[in-house]
Image: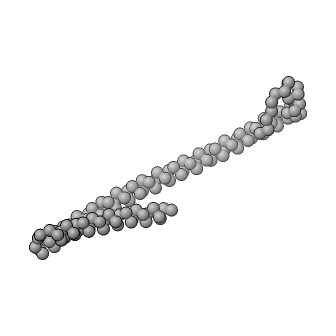
Amino acid sequence: MANNDKRKMNKVIAAAMIGSLSGAVLGLLLAPKSGRELRQDINEMAYKLGDKTEEIRDKAQSSWHNIEDKTEKTVEKSKSWIQKGKLLVGNLKTLVHEIRHGALTKTGSLKTLEDQDGGYPTKEI
């Protein structure tokens, strides 16, 4: 799944670069300049585009790493909460068993307790 996201990010960056380059080249080619001036402008534009591409790539990578870090932290917190929940459920099961066992031991049965005390409602757990 992470590879698909990286591929999508690369496609977006590539599309932005191609669009920028196409626009810059068309703008220069349609401008009324001499061949030397045009080549110089294209060269300058290529350097600027290269710098801009690196800047965009760095921002995209930084954002991607931020998302990865936040996702990893969220997964770890979720795992921790799941473990705590499992521990709590286990403790509750033990407590219910102890209460139930204690009630059966003291009275002989829950039915006996109900008969003696005038019909306290009992519920199977």
Quarter of the figure with residue 95: top right
User: In this view, which residue lies farthest toward the front?
Assistant: 30
Please state the horizontal and vertical placement of residue 75, each as a whole percent of the image. Answer: 53, 51
Please state the horizontal and vertical placement of residue 38, each as a whole percent of the image. Answer: 14, 71
Residue at 87% in and 32% down: 111
Residue at 42% in and 63% down: 8
Residue at 70% in and 41% down: 91
Taking 49 as reference, is 120 left or right? right
Which sits in the foreground, 20 or 45? 20
Number of labelled discs? 0
Residue at 47% in and 64% down: 4
Taking 107 as reference, is 49 left or right? left
Q: Is residue 122 above or below residue 25?
A: above
User: In this view, which residue lies farthest toward the bottom?
Assistant: 35
Please state the horizontal and vertical placement of residue 37, each as a whole percent of the image. Answer: 12, 71
Q: Is residue 122 above or below residue 24?
A: above
Q: Colour scheme used in the picture?
A: one colour
Taking 87 as reference, is 114 left or right? right
Q: Is residue 47 visible?
A: no
User: In this view, which residue lies farthest toward the top?
Assistant: 118
Taking 16 as reference, is 27 left or right? left
Which sits in the foreground, 39 or 58? 39
Please state the horizontal and vertical placement of residue 90, each as a whole percent of the image. Answer: 70, 44
Q: Is residue 64 above or below residue 103?
A: below
User: In this view, which residue lies farthest toward the left?
Assistant: 34
Q: Quadrant of the C terminus?
A: top right
Q: Is residue 53 visible?
A: yes
Which sits in the foreground, 124 or 69? 124
